[in-house]
Image (cartoon, rainbow, N blue to C red):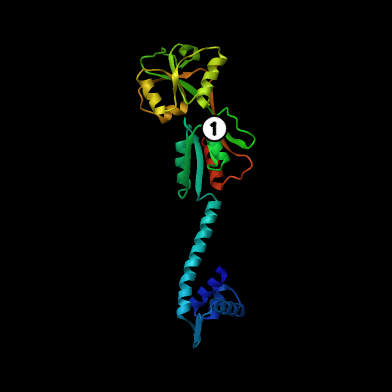
Amino acid sequence: MDIRQLRYFVAIVEEGTVSGAAKRLHLSQPPLSQQLKAMEEDVGALLLERIGKRLEVTEAGKRLYEYALQMIELMEAAKSEVQEVGNGLNGRLSIGVNTLSVAGLSPALQHFNRLYPKMTYKIHQGESSHLCRLVREREVELAFVRLPLELGDDLSVLHHEQEPFYVISSDRHTFGDEREISLADVVNLPLLLPSTQGLGVHYLILKSFSELRLEPTIQGECSDIGLLMRLVSAGFCISIVPESLLDHYPGFPIRRRKLSGESGLISSIGLVALRRHRLSKAARNFIDLYRSEK
């Protein structure tokens, strides 16, 4: 039996006659009678018996009718859900986010959730190189990473944006009233670098000092951003962080000064995906929304 035959059987049971079911299904009577006979032969039991002008359901027919209703309902639910997934109204959005976060991601996800309330989420946080590996392994479809980064030919950048860096300190380390400062202004202060040596932001900061032929006073490095903010607040050190990090770690008693453009320190953020892989409708909807809000 197939789902089409079950629909025929339900219609016959509910109408009580083959003619009534045929009218309901917009079919002629002979094919419908043949389908009923084929079903009875298939299950090896009488499903309907004629009493007067109507067909009455046998005990076997009643059991099949119950199952038929369940199977038709499941089929309709599956069809509806698959269509919703195909249209990006349902399903799962799998996305990776760099450890130092991305400006505007939380509002974008909140907006996306209001538009697609049936969506579920799989969010990974980690270093950019690790996130690229997750994209390649299809653990996530999209990932926000810090650039520059060796992406390879298999990954493409779908969206690109930039954000400035800030020097953060406690009241112990002051820089006057200037709204912007340069790397030269902090070269002699104890600097605790975010992230880990050779990766992401850590690399960008040291590269900018090197290009200006400056040798910073490196106090060390700290990949735990919450701890970094506490150490800066306590006056143990200063640090240099991208703007979005300050939005995600509010409430610390720190001073901030934007690095001037001549420092050449700008953080590039890329949204990457597999180059020759068709993104789900959910992922494409999220990209469109995120771009529109930038």
Q: Which residue is mark 1?
A: 129
Q: Secondary structure at mark 1?
A: helix
From what the image shows, is residue 275 above or below residue 225?
below
Name the quadrant containing residue 285.
top right
Residue 264 visible within the image? no
Please tell me in which quadrant of the rendered image residue 32 appears. Answer: bottom right
Q: Amino acid at mark 1?
A: Ser
Image quadrant where one finds the N terminus:
bottom right
Query: Measured from the top left, where is residue 7 in percent x and y?
Result: 53, 71
For residue 169, side relative to residue 82 (left or right): left
- Compared to 167, does 28 lie above or below? below
Can residue 283 be seen?
A: yes
Quick one: 286 or 198, which is closer to the camera? 198
Residue depicted at x 47% and y 78%: 60
Q: Quadrant of residue 33?
A: bottom right
Q: Residue at x 51, y 62 (%)?
A: 76
